[in-house]
Image (cartoon, grey):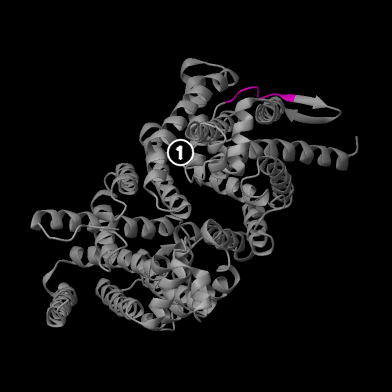
Amino acid sequence: MDISVFGSRKLWVAGLALLILVALATLPFYGSLYMTILMTAILMYIIITVSWVIFSGPSGYLSLASAAFFGIGIYASAILLPTTGAVLPVLVVVLIAGALSFVVAVLVGFLTLRLRGIYFAIFTFGLVELIKQFLLFWEFEVTHTRGRYVLLVDSRTIFYIMLGIFVALILTAYFIRNSKFGLALRSIGENEAAAAHSGVNVTMVKVITFGISAVFMGMAGAIMATRWTYVDPYIAFNPFFSFMPVLMAVFGGLGQFYGPIVGATIFAYLEEVLLTTFPYYYMLIFGCVLVATMLFMPKGFTGLIQKGWKRVSGGQQHANT
Amino acid sequence: MPESVITILDLAIGGLLLGAIYALIAMGLSLQYGVARVLNIAHGEFIMIGAFATYTLYTVFGINPLLTLVIVGPIIFVIGFLLHRTMFRRLSITAPTPDAYEASSLLATFGLLFIIQNLALIGWGATPRAYSYLNFGVNIGGAVFTANRLVILGFAVAIGVGFYLFLIRTRMGKAIRAAAQDAKTAGLMGVNINLVLAICFGLGAVLAAVAGTLMSMRISLTPTIGLNYTVISIIIIVLGGLGSIPGSFIGGFILGIIGTVVTYYNPSLSLAAYYFIFVMLLLVRPKGIFGK
């Protein structure tokens, strides 16, 4: 491959990314309030999906704990940002929520990442429910409350914090993907035993990545709580937020860096448009699309587009595995 | 009889009842995962379908819920069989490795969950429903039980034992057990493996639907009840050892009794207790109590 072509392509991608970033950053100035709120929701789904992909994509461990880390962020925010008498600034609370999710993820990771395959998926799913049931019990028996109200924050502030988390996440994901660390993670996904024999500290790499992916979910949850203003354990620890990132990433296609982003954007937009008017039909369509994706386009939406593009452009390469 | 003995008897019957239902649904999932390698997240949706079919047949057409068992069973079997023949068969052909098949079929069943649940929400709506059947007290040595509880217990145990005999005594049962041990080798020995796997998936769905029919006499029904039962079945099959059908039968009773006792002391803790057992089990002995 010609190195200069590669370089110019990279430049082109960076330019495009910068353009999108500028368009997003100035959105509150030219777009309506509705646009800003819609974009916040889309960014939230992208954040959860991409942070899920950081860990589960290369390592091959199917994590269903996203809702747990997202929920921890939500609850951190609910406790630290009450409607009256909040002492900490919103941004600090978001950072604390990220740190808290990181700590929980690392602890859970040390305990469970030795579980292989389906066991890990089941365990992480159980984790969400365990935390939810514990909180329900706590609120029912100890504090005698049901749910909490969260400080109302200006939509623009929420949007900018969400955008900040998004940018930090994309940079992190990019660096992990292109570093030795990311290579180690991929080698674990391909053959864990071989990776360990080649000198990769398997446990460390898995646990740290799991923790990093949880940071962003926690932060997104913390800021989203201020948008929802009322949370209870059912809202915060909804297993839906564990399935969603998996489905969005698989639909988008795990083969490319931008695949999960495309998947999350499409579904977040559809949800915003359909969920309020036809909630059941939205979820029904969602299910059908998921089954169809698994059956007919295992490489996801972007994989399909690429294949189609190759056919149209008459490229020499065949779309091989 | 003294008060404490009545309480113990009450808990014992309650625990056996819950345990029998759990045993049925867990055996169903055990067939689907242990033999057909599909960790069916939509398992609970078949329970829900069974329960709603019974409700509708009883309230609209006045059909006896126990008669519904014979109506719902075959229909759900055909649905499950065809699902495996079309969807999961295709996934298993395209998947490069057995692990990849487990992951892709797991995700496909998520899709099924959304489809079935939302079709039910569109059809029946989200308001809780219940009906009353055999709802009168029966006095056993001083303790009073509702008749439908005893009927559910009797039928659940009979179906469970019948199913077990089917596995042990018939040729098809033998083929299923062989496929559970090693599907590939069973195929080489002349078992029509694709047929057996599809039958397993169908039978798993039937056990769920039948449990749903029985349960519908006692619980309030909404289209979203399914997922909870799926999770409970998963906990039980991990408890009994993934793929072990006797293990899930016994595990069902163990969890049912624990659940009933915990509920007696503090109702808000029963689900938390299940998850606690589950999480501890995965950490200490992920192979399950009866796992090899």
Could you say where residue B277 lies in the image, as x and y percent from the top left?
A: 67, 57
Which residue is nearer to you in this view: A219 or B289? B289
Q: Secondary structure at mark 1?
A: loop
Residue at horizontal 71 percent and vertical 45 percent from the top? B260
Residue at horizontal 11 percent and vertical 72 percent from the top? A30
Is residue A218 in view from this perspective? no
Residue at horizontal 46 percent and vertical 30 percent from the top? B81
The magenta stretch is: B132-137
* Outermost left residue: A313
Q: Is residue B170 magenta?
A: no
Q: Is B155 rendered above or below residue A80?
A: above
Residue at horizontal 44 percent and vertical 36 percent from the top? B84
Is residue B102 in view from this perspective? yes
Dot 1 falls on which chain?
A: B
Q: Quadrant of the N terminus of chain A?
A: bottom left
Q: Quadrant of the C terminus of chain A?
A: bottom left
Three-letter code for the amino acid on which mark 1 is drawn = Pro
Magenta stretch, main secondary structure class: loop
Label 1: which residue? B223
Which residue is nearer to you in this view: B122 or B22? B22
Q: How many marks?
A: 1
B271 sits left or right of A52 in the view: right
* Outermost right residue: B1
Q: Is A248 rendered above or below residue A23?
A: above
